[in-house]
Amino acid sequence: MRAAYGMSKKADVLEFLLELNESVVAAEADGKPVVGPGIPPSAKKLKDLITTDKLTM
């Protein structure tokens, strides 16, 4: 999870996520676009993002 958010190993997870949430709220309040999780709307070649790999247990 840390790598996905660009979080350092020493960062406090809750503090980091709270600050991230606050920055998203501020951006929304300023009318700036905020991209949610998942595949970004700018992705054009969705076929390149699909994999047949899977984990089995």
Image (cartoon, rainbow, N blue to C red):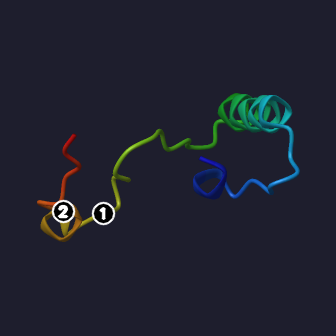
Q: Quadrant of residue 48?
A: bottom left
Identified at 19% across, 45% down, the residue is 56
> Which three-letter amino acid code belongs to the residue tagged 2?
Leu
Give residue 45's position: percent from left, percent from top. 19, 69
Vertical position of residue 33 compared to residue 48: above or below: above
Give residue 22's position: percent from left, percent from top. 79, 30
> Which three-letter amino acid code belongs to the residue tagged 1?
Ala
Quadrant of image for the C terminus = top left
Callout 2 environment at 10 Å: few (<14), some (14 to 19), or many (20+)? few
Identified at 85% across, 32% down, the residue is 15
Identified at 86% across, 46% down, the residue is 11
Q: Is mark 1 on a helix, strand or loop?
A: loop
Report the disc number at residue 57: none
Q: Is residue 39 left or right of residue 26?
A: left
Which residue is the site of mark 1?
43
Report the disc number at residue 46: 2
Vertical position of residue 28 compared to residue 5: above or below: above
Do labels 1 and 2 touch, CB within 8 Å?
A: yes
Instruction: Return the residue nearer the eye: 18 or 43.
Output: 18
Give residue 2's position: percent from left, percent from top. 66, 50
